Every structure is written in structure tokens, then in C-alpha cells.
Image: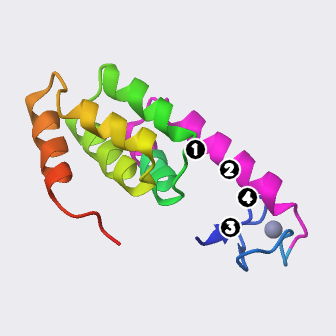
Amino acid sequence: MRTFCSKCFAESDPGACTCGRCGADLAQSAAEFEDKLLGALHHPIPDHQMTAVRVLGERQSTRAISEFAALLGGDVDYYLAREILLALRRIASPESERVLVEATRHRSRLVRMFAKKLASTRRPE
Ligand SMILES: [Zn+2]
């Protein structure tokens, strides 16, 4: 996983504890970045929500799974739901699998269809 310093945005070496450029604590910085992403899931601007969903999926954030489940259970539009399902599949934990299976019974037919399609195709490596 590529890591970026949330203070100066420099890319850091995998496994490094502090940022090579500004010296920020990267573990703390990563947690703060994740908090920001989780907060952005409730952003009023859909583009921000979409980006947060995508990045949380790329980071395989297990903390995002319950938020994703809540969003899917609420008044979610198809495009956001689709991005959430793709992110859940990337996270690939028993919990995210469970939410994906639940989505195959989603009240929106389009979301159900997309969840079923994902379930029937191989996970990308
Ligand atoms: Zn830095």
C-alpha cells in the first residue's frame, strides 16, 4: 500500500514510521487521514463521497465497512452504491463479504443486479 503524509502529502517508504520530508508520525497521520475519509462519507457533495469511498476501498479500511453498510441501508443513489460495493470487494474481509451478500437483496433492483454480478465474477488481484 502506498502511504502519503497527511501533513505535507509526500509519499513515504512502506514501513517507515515518520515522514522523510517533514518528520510527521505516519501511523498517527494515517489514522487521521482515515478519520477524514470516514467523515467525507457524509459529505453533501457526491463527488467527495465517491472519492472517499474509493480511497477507503483502496486502503482496505475495515473501519469503513459499517459506514458502508449504513449508507447502503439509507437513501443511497445507484452510482454511490456501486462504488461502495466495489470498495467492499476490495476490502475482502468476512464482514465486507457479509455486507455484499446483503446487497444482493437490496431494495433497489439495479443495486441488487450489480451486487450479484460482483458475486459471480472473480475478485481482482
Ligand atoms: Zn510529511
Judge the density around disc 3: few (<14), some (14-19), many (≥20) Cα neighbours within 10 Å. some
Q: With 99 as the anchor, is 65 left or right in this view?
A: right
Residue position for label 2: 33
Residue 95 image position (x, y, % from top left): 44, 39
Q: Are the two marked residues, 1 and 2, in contact with CB atoms closer than 8 angstroms?
A: yes
Q: How many marks?
A: 4
**The N terminus is located in which quarter?**
bottom right
| Location of ligand 1 given as a quarter of the image | bottom right
Q: Quadrant of residue 84?
A: top left
Magenta-colored segment: predominant secondary structure:
helix
Q: Alpha-carbon neighbours of circle 4 within 10 Å: few (<14), some, or many (≥20)? A: some
Q: Are circles 2 and 3 on residues that touch, CB within 8 Å? A: yes
Q: Is 63 left, or right, of 100 in this rendering?
A: right
At 49% across and 55% down in the image, what residue appears?
55
What whole-number distance in Å separates the C-alpha atoms at marks 2 and 3? 9 Å
Give coordinates of residue 119: x percent, y percent. 19, 50
Give the labeled residue for mark 1. 37
Q: Residue furthest front?
A: 94
- Give the residue at mark 3: 4
Q: Please say whether residue 11 is one of the residues in the magenta stretch.
A: no
Q: Which mark is first along the chain, 1 or 3?
A: 3
Picture residue at 19% right of the left edge, 26% below the top: 106
Q: CA distance from mark 3 to mark 1?
A: 14 Å
**Residue 43 in view:** no
Q: Amino acid at mark 2?
A: Phe
> Is the residue under label 4 in contact with that under label 3 (CB below 8 Å)?
yes
Residue 121 drawn at (x, y percent)? 16, 60
Q: Which segment is the magenta one?
A: 22-50
- Element at label 2: helix
